Every structure is written in structure tokens, then in C-alpha cells.
Image (cartoon, coloured by chain):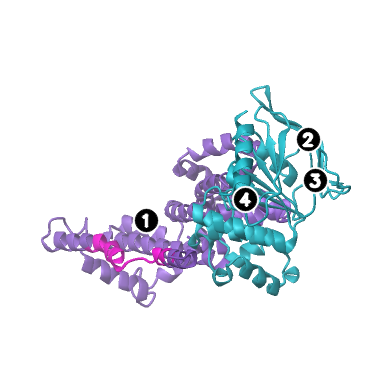
Chain colours: A cyan, B purple
């Protein structure tokens, strides 16, 4: 993969490999991944099911130790999971016994909670009026907005999103994509976004990394230089979609 | 319809979902009332002799005397409160001991495979032993009285609490623990702030089953010749041929057992947010 010219990337992935054993046989998930992510960038990871997108995200999040190689966040090797790498999971993973507000502030010490900031964030994600509701009373889109708010309140250096809108209907998905882009712009948030949807990747990403199905590294990188908001009907968008599809078919 | 109004509708629909309709309350008392009517019919037409099945009226008179009359005015008059407090001490002591051992062990077994492997053989083996088998040994160890009953109650209540806590904690999806780690909660903090609340529905089931079985084993413990307690009254009444007092004892144990179950749920709901969503 082409190396970034930026001197100090926020995230640097160096010769990262991961494999696990099933019944004594090693199964390679990915090998020798190299990549860099700049501050404020949104990179989409795309690839077929089982190619290791979610595993890579787990390694960066600190949920999983890589078999070899390392990831550096702002020059420091990443360790265990922590609030500097916020994760939005595919399923909402909200705590069902806590209200929206309590989910957002979960794990924070009482004296570090700025209730004005919580209110402002809930306003931003459109959930201020639902702050006292339990997750079971919310729709799928609302739950994912809570999941987004609870990581953003901690101002993570890196936001990791694992197919977060995969289970949503088309209209809600579009709204969530717009919300994410707005929050990214306002906060200069750096994001790695896993998806298997080519159109979603092109709508959101600054760059797209394709992962090898056969346990290799990133096979291709696509720079998406289209102006936002992006229109899937324009020829340049469709050309890039065709390019991605052809790489995925290879 | 806009997304927001759709969301509001959904919230209202789900809010109303938890309310218990009047019809189900009526259904809840229907069967007991039918059984009462059947019992009254059997007594009124002398289908079964009174020494085998006393009439509801006779049972009410005996209950009134047992609960409300002055102590000393009859052989069992006014003894209820003393028997109740003796039985409650035994149930609460045995049940608390069981919960204190079973919940931590269940949590450890549910989350740590090696502890589960260490305990499962022993626990499953002991679980299969009927409580009555322990009675002779308990009487030799502890004599007749509080200790034997508390031992039996604790032993019996332990297994459902342990097993349900184990199941609940084993079923906590890794994604919740990953979320906790990502939000900065320490490994020990995750036990109390994530695993216990997530397992709470199962823990409550275990505690309620444990409470029910505690009352059953209380009676077993009190049938051994202790001087007071609701089980002791039933045993005395059997020896005196007072079936009306046996029926009173059975009703009171059912009533107090139900009350204890409701109080337990209320206590858990008051103490733990995670119990309130049930």
C-alpha cells in the first residue's frame, strides 16, 4: 500500500498479522497489514464477510492481542481497551437497565460528568427528549445514536465503528450517515468504519481500504475525493463504485 | 410520518406493554375461588368426613383463634406470632446463608471455566441428593432446633440460586464486557457494574426458587420435634388429630411464602436498578 506523506499520523498499523487455531490447525485472518490514518480522516474498511475487518477493529480497540506486529496511536503502542478508542458495535450493546443518559455517562466518575455537555450531546444526536427512557423503548436508530453519544462524550482520539448501521432500514441508515458526517466535521473526529456496503463506504469515506479474503493485507486503497454531500447518481461516484466492485470480485 | 413521530409512537407502544390488564387479575383469583366453592360443597354435603377434611368455616374459626386469640385461652390460641417469628428467623438465616455462598460461587463458575470444572461435579452430585437424606445427619451434627433447620434450608436454597446465577453470568454477551472495557471500567468494576446487572433476571429467578424451597425445607426441619414454628404446629396437630389446624398451617405457610416472595422482589427492585426492568 502507498505510504502516507504525513509525518505524524494518528494511527499507524505496522506489519500486523493475526491467526488463531481451530482443532490444532492455524487459520490466518490477515497478515502484514500496513496503513496510516491522519487526524480527522474517515477510512472505511471494506471486504467480503470473514475477511477479518471486525478482527482488525478488535485489535485496534484493544479487545484482542495481535499475533504479530503492532498499532501505534499518536506514537504510543496501543494496549488494553480504553476510552481513547471509542467503539460503536454492530449491535447496540447498550445496558438495558440504564436510561439513555445513564448509558451515555456509564463508567464516568460523578465529579467528571458535565451535565451541560451531556445535554448538548444528547441534543446533537436528537435524543434529549428521551434522556430518561430505557433502551427497550427506543428504535434501532435511536439505540445506535445513544451508542454513538456514549463514546463521543469521552472525546476519543479514534472512533471505531463495526457495521453500526447494518441492521437499520434504508431511511434511518441515511439519517445516521448524515449525523456521523456532521459530528465528524464538527469534532474533527478520526474514524475507522467497517462496512460491506460499497455505496455506504463511498458516501462516508475519505479513503477506502480493501481487505484480502485469503488472509493477506490490504489489497487496494481508494482515495475518495468527491465533494460532500455526495450524490450516488453522479458519474464520478458510479465510476468509483464500479472500481470497488471489480476489486471485490477479484 | 417523520422519523421522530415514528419513534414517539414506538416509545408509547412499549410503555403500555408492561401494564397488567384487569382480566388477568380476575383470572388469577378464579381458580382459588372455584376450589374454595368445591371444598365448601364437599363439606356441606358430607361427602368426606370432617376428621379428614374440615369445613372452610371450621378452618376459619381455628385460624382466628390461632392468630388473634389471647395466648393461653386454648392449646394453640394466639401462638401464631411466636411460631411465625421462629420460622422466619430460620428461613431468613438459611436463605441468606445460601444466597451469600451461591451468588459469588455462581458468578465465578459462570465466568471462569476452571472454577466451573472444579465445582460442577460436586454441586451436581449433591443437588441430586433429596433433602430428607440430610436430615438424620443434620440432627446428629447440630441436634434438634435452629441449626439443623438453618442447615437444611441453606442447603436446599443453595442449588437453585447457584445454578441460575451461573447460567445468568455465563450468558453475558462478550460485547457488553468489551463495551465496559472501552468505556474505561476496570475488570473488577465490570463484575459489579455489568455481569451482576446483566445476570440479574436469572439471579432473581434463582432467589425466588430458593425462597420457595426454603419454606418447604423449613417445614421438614421443624417436623423433627422443635417446640415452635409453623412446621412444628402442623406436626403437633397431626399427632392430636386436629386436621383443621393442619389446614390452617398449610394456608399460612402458602400465604407467608407468597408474601416473602413479593417482599423479596420488592427489595431487589428497590436495591437494584437492573431488577426494575423485569
Judging by the rendered image, the residue that carries numbered circle 3 is A79
For marks 2 and 1, give the CA distance: 85 Å
Q: Is residue B5 above or below residue B234?
A: below
For marks 2 and 4, give the CA distance: 22 Å
Q: Position of residue B93 (x, y in %)?
A: 55, 59
For marks 2 and 3, give the CA distance: 25 Å
The dot on residue B235 is 1
Q: Is residue B248 above or below residue B163?
A: below
**Label 2 secondary element:** loop
Q: Nearer the viewer, residue A17 or A93?
A: A17
Q: Which residues are magenta?
A: B13-33
Mark 3 or 1: in front is 3
Q: Badge 1: few (under 14), some or many (20 or more) residues near its Cα, within 10 Å? A: many
Residue A193 shows up from this direction: yes
**Label 1 secondary element:** helix
Q: Position of residue A172 (x, y in %)?
A: 52, 57
For this orientation, the residue located farthest to the left is B45
Marks 1/4 in contact by CB < 8 Å: the verdict is no
The dot on residue A203 is 4
The subunit letter for the residue under badge 2 reads A
Judging by the rendered image, the residue that carries numbered circle 2 is A1
Q: Badge 4: few (under 14), some or many (20 or more) residues near its Cα, within 10 Å? A: many
Mark 2 or 3: in front is 2
Amino acid at each position: 500500500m502507498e505510504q502516507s506523506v504525513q509525518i505524524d499520523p494518528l494511527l499507524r498499523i505496522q506489519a500486523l498479522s493475526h491467526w488463531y487455531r481451530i482443532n490444532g490447525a492455524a487459520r490466518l485472518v490477515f497478515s502484514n497489514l500496513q496503513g496510516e490514518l491522519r487526524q480527522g480522516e474517515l477510512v472505511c474498511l471494506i471486504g467480503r464477510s470473514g475477511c477479518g475487518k471486525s478482527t482488525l477493529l478488535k485489535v485496534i480497540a484493544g479487545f484482542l492481542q495481535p499475533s504479530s506486529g503492532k498499532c501505534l496511536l499518536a506514537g504510543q503502542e496501543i494496549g488494553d481497551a480504553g476510552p481513547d478508542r471509542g467503539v460503536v458495535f454492530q449491535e447496540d450493546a447498550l445496558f438495558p437497565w440504564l436510561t439513555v443518559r445513564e448509558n451515555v455517562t456509564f463508567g464516568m466518575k460523578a465529579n467528571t460528568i458535565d451535565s451541560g455537555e451531556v445535554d448538548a450531546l444528547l441534543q446533537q444526536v436528537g435524543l434529549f427528549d428521551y434522556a430518561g427512557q430505557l433502551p427497550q423503548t427506543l428504535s434501532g436508530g435511536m439505540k445506535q445514536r445513544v451508542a454513538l453519544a456514549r463514546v463521543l462524550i469521552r472525546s476519543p482520539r479514534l472512533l471505531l465503528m463495526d457495521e453500526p448501521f447494518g441492521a437499520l432500514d434504508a431511511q434511518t441508515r441515511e439519517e445516521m450517515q448524515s449525523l456521523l458526517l456532521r459530528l465528524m466535521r464538527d469534532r474533527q473526529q478520526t474514524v475507522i468504519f467497517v462496512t460491506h456496503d460499497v455505496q455506504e463506504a463511498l458516501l462516508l469515506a475519505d479513503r477506502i481500504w480493501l481487505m484480502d479474503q485469503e488472509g493477506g493485507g490490504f489489497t487496494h486503497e481508494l482515495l475518495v475525493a468527491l465533494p460532500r454531500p455526495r450524490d450516488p447518481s453522479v458519474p464520478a461516484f458510479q465510476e468509483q463504485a464500479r472500481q470497488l466492485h471489480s476489486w471485490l470480485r477479484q | 410520518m417523520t422519523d421522530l413521530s415514528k419513534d414517539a409512537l414506538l416509545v408509547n407502544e412499549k410503555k403500555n406493554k408492561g401494564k397488567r390488564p384487569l382480566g388477568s387479575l380476575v383470572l388469577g383469583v378464579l381458580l382459588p375461588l372455584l376450589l374454595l366453592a368445591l371444598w365448601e360443597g364437599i363439606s356441606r354435603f358430607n361427602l368426606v368426613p370432617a376428621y379428614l377434611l374440615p369445613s372452610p368455616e371450621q378452618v376459619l374459626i381455628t385460624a382466628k383463634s390461632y392468630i388473634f386469640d389471647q395466648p393461653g385461652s386454648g392449646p394453640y390460641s394466639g401462638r401464631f406470632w411466636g411460631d411465625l417469628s421462629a420460622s422466619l428467623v430460620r428461613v431468613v438465616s438459611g436463605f441468606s446463608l445460601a444466597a451469600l455462598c451461591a451468588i459469588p460461587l455462581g458468578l465465578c463458575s459462570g465466568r471462569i471455566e476452571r472454577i466451573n470444572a472444579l465445582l460442577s461435579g460436586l454441586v451436581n452430585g449433591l443437588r441430586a441428593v433429596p433433602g430428607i437424606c440430610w436430615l438424620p445427619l443434620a440432627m446428629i451434627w447440630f441436634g434438634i432446633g435452629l441449626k439443623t433447620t438453618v442447615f437444611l434450608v441453606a442447603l436446599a436454597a443453595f442449588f437453585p440460586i447457584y445454578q441460575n446465577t451461573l447460567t445468568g453470568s455465563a450468558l453475558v454477551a462478550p460485547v457488553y464486557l468489551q463495551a465496559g472495557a472501552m468505556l474505561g471500567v476496570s475488570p473488577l468494576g465490570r463484575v459489579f457494574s455489568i455481569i451482576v446487572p446483566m445476570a440479574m433476571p436469572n439471579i432473581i429467578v434463582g432467589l425466588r426458587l430458593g425462597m420457595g424451597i426454603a419454606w418447604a425445607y423449613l417445614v421438614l426441619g421443624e417436623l423433627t420435634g422443635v417446640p415452635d414454628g409453623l412446621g412444628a404446629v402442623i406436626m403437633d396437630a397431626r399427632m392430636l388429630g386436629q386436621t383443621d389446624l393442619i389446614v390452617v398451617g398449610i394456608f399460612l405457610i402458602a400465604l407467608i411464602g407468597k408474601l416473602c416472595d413479593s417482599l423479596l422482589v420488592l427489595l431487589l427492585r428497590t436495591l437494584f436498578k437492573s431488577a426494575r426492568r423485569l
